[in-house]
Amino acid sequence: MRRQAEQVIHGPVSGLPFPHRVVPAGRREDLRREIEAMHGSGRLSDLIFQSYARIFDCPLPEDCAGARSLIVGALAHPQSRVTFTWAGTRATVLIPPSYVRYWELTWDAEDLLNRLLAPAGHWARFARVPQKALAVHSGLARYGRNNIAYVPGLGSFHMLVSYYSSLPCDDDGWVEPQFLERCATCTACLRACPTDAIPGDREVLRQDRCLTFYSGYSGPQELPDWVDPDWIECLVGCRRCQIVCPENRAFREWIEDDWELTQEETELLLGGLTAATLPPALHAKLDRMGLVEFFGLEECLQMLASKLAILTSRM
């Protein structure tokens, strides 16, 4: 899988070993205006718009005041396997790409980027922006019918990273959002989605019908009454539309990072742990997976308890 990724044309930062693009820092405001317009036209629900509003309401960090560009990249990223034990029976579930060790890999990429930029007197700092929209507008990715970003050579098996930088950007490759050509005739993801979140008659996902939204992507939330527990197959997120996508054919079996929850740990999580009652060893394991930093401790514990309750009820 990684060999395929290496065939991709990486981008303008010499030596950066993953595909990336650079656009002027001012494009952040273009993303804001686009999202506001989508909300105003009814294509973006209030719930999703609020999550984007929180991004744009955050002021730029002081050390990013001189940013001249935005760098967006895609790191090859596999699925992860989690095995848990319940009532003496072991069961395995998967976590889709982009969750496990997200922040660790994001900071590693930032460190590498700074080492490459430093000789020319430039810097990079993590940028909190709508990453999918940035990746698609920059030409790094295209949308699938499922509104997931697809990168050549990686499909959707990647995690996006974005950084402000002092690097000049004179050649603006900003483009209108484009969809994969295959999506014009393929309906695999539409047919695989149990909630009708992927429409056949419009380009924008019905975000409030997407299981991923209620499974951790935008922050753990209680599952609505209309969600059938049988639809839940992952410990975090949902992979139904990705795993059937022809663009991911070469990556479907790409699974790394085996994690295990013992019977005792499963029981503890099901019991509703809090930050005060979480055993240090289990806390350390969730830290190594990167889930605590991704979601926040209390939210992570809430999500795992909710998902394990559904998954163990079927054993």
Image (cartoon, rainbow, N blue to C red):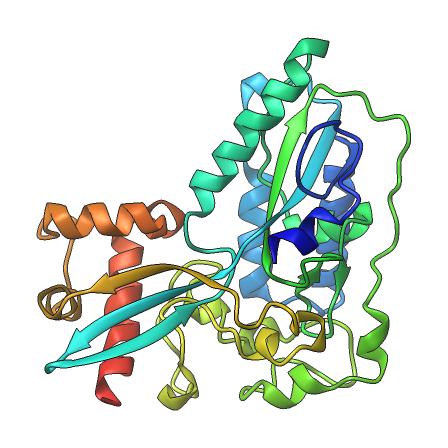
The correct choice, above or below, for 157 with respect to 182 in the image is above
301 vs 14, nearest the viewer: 14
44 vs 7, nearest the viewer: 7
Give the side of residue 85 with respect to residue 156, left or right. left
**Measuring 57% from the left and 62% from the top, which residue is drawn there?**
48
Give the side of residue 42 with respect to residue 78, left or right. right
Location of residue 94 (image quadrant): bottom left
Residue 60 seen: no
The correct choice, above or below, for 85 with respect to 50 in the image is below
Give the side of residue 155 with respect to residue 220, left or right. right
33 vs 306, nearest the viewer: 306
Quadrant placement of the C terminus:
bottom left
**Measuring 67% from the left and 77% from the top, which residue is drawn there?**
245
The correct choice, above or below, for 291 with respect to 21 in the image is below
Locate residue 258, reporting x and y percent.
34, 61
**Measuring 38% from the left and 63% from the top, which residue is drawn there?**
220
Residue 72 seen: yes
Locate residue 9, reporting x and y percent.
80, 44
Locate residue 35, reporting x and y percent.
71, 54
**Measuring 49% from the left and 75% from the top, which residue is drawn there?**
211
Residue sitting farthest toward the front: 3
Quadrant placement of the N terminus:
bottom right
Locate residue 46, reporting x and y percent.
58, 64
116 vs 164, nearest the viewer: 116
